[in-house]
């Protein structure tokens, strides 16, 4: 009997060791299998965010940026250039033409801004914790206010015409400048969200704004340059400060009918 007890005791030690090893082997795969799930739930870099971003969300962000660029980065500045071209026109038909082109461009700009704002509200998480979103919501209200001011335009020659023109001009200039700034901030936000390069788009937009600014400033000096006689052509325009003698006869250039 004593021999059997000793024999059983000698076999109990290997059995407990084998049981411990089995428990250890079964515990290790479970813990290692849980580790990748933790990494997937909490991405550690922007590269992981860009990989997990769906193609539909990326398309929505790109479309939103295109709509806002077309509105505040192209149509609105071009509309301002068009209406400034009418300042040197005396023909009523051409004045109406410039005015209607300006109105059409601004209406299209307001519609595109509205579409971009609706898409932003429906598709994106708007926490308004950055300058791009805050300026964007302010611009949306300013653009619609500018459109309403344009609708209530008083007739030329009325007492309130000067005040209306000043308010319309100041608000339009502010909207245009803030819109251009917000396009740049939108490009940087796109880069932070998707980790994609925006260098080429920044260069193209900068070249476009530089050309528009050049033509904007050139319009004020065009008439002065013409009077200085430096415009290319066969005949030079005599400056207005030159003294004409009675014997000198100037032929008047024929004017095109309006």
Image (tube, grey):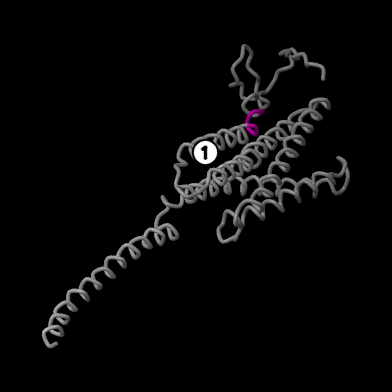
Q: Name the residue under label 1.
A: 206
Q: Could you tell me residue 215's position as x and y percent? A: 61, 32
Residue at figure coordinates x 73%, y 42% from the top left: 111
Residue that protrudes farthest toward the bottom in the picture = 2
Viewer-proximal residue among 28 and 235: 28
Q: Could you tell me residue 55's position as x and y percent? A: 53, 43
In the shown orientation, is residue 207 left or right of residue 144? left
Residue that protrudes farthest toward the front in the picture = 1
In which quadrant of the rendered image does the N terminus lie? Answer: bottom left
> What are the residue bounds of the magenta stretch?
219-223
Picture quadrant where residue 256 is located: top right
Viewer-proximal residue among 217 and 248: 217
- Image height of 232 relative to 72, above or below: above
Q: Could you tell me residue 225's position as x and y percent? A: 61, 27
Q: Could you tell me residue 179's position as x and y percent? A: 62, 46
- Image height of 208 relative to 20, above or below: above
In the shown orientation, is residue 97 left or right of residue 236? right
SS category of the residue bearing label 1:
helix
- Image height of 30 relative to 170, above or below: below
Picture quadrant where residue 89 is located: top right
Residue at figure coordinates x 63%, y 38% from the top left: 70
In the shown orientation, is residue 203 left or right of residue 245? left
Residue at figure coordinates x 64%, y 42% from the top left: 72
Residue at figure coordinates x 67%, y 49% from the top left: 117
In which quadrant of the rendered image does the C terminus lie? Answer: top right
Viewer-proximal residue among 131 and 10: 10
Q: Is the magenta stretch mostly helix, strand or loop?
A: helix
In the shown orientation, is residue 233 left or right of residue 193? right
- Circle 1 residues within 10 Å: few <14, some 14–19, many ≥20: some
Picture quadrant where residue 80 is located: top right
């Amino acid at each position: 009997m004593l021999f059997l007890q000793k024999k059983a005791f000698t076999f109990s030690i290997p059995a407990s060791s084998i049981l411990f090893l089995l428990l250890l082997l079964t515990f290790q795969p479970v813990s290692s299998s849980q580790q990748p799930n933790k990494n997937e739930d909490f991405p550690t870099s922007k590269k992981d965010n860009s990989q997990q971003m769906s193609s539909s969300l990326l398309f929505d962000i790109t479309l939103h940026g295109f709509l806002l660029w077309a509105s505040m980065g192209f149509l609105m500045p071009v509309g301002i250039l068009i209406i400034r071209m009418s300042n040197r026109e005396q023909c009523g038909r051409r004045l109406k033409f410039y005015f209607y082109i300006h109105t059409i461009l601004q209406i299209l700009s307001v519609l595109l801004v509205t579409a971009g704002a609706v898409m932003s509200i429906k598709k994106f998480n708007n926490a308004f914790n950055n300058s791009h979103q805050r300026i964007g919501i302010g611009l949306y209200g300013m653009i619609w206010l500018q459109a309403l001011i344009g609708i209530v335009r008083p007739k030329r020659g009325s007492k309130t015409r000067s005040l209306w023109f000043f308010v319309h001009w100041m608000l339009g200039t502010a909207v245009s400048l803030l819109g251009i700034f917000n396009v740049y901030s939108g490009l940087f936000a796109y880069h932070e969200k998707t980790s994609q390069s925006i260098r080429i788009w920044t260069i193209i937009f900068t070249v476009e704004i530089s050309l528009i600014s050049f033509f904007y400033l050139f319009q004020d000096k065009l008439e002065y340059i013409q009077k200085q006689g430096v415009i290319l052509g066969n005949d030079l325009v005599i400056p207005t400060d030159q003294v004409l003698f009675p014997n000198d006869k100037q032929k008047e250039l024929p004017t095109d009918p309006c």
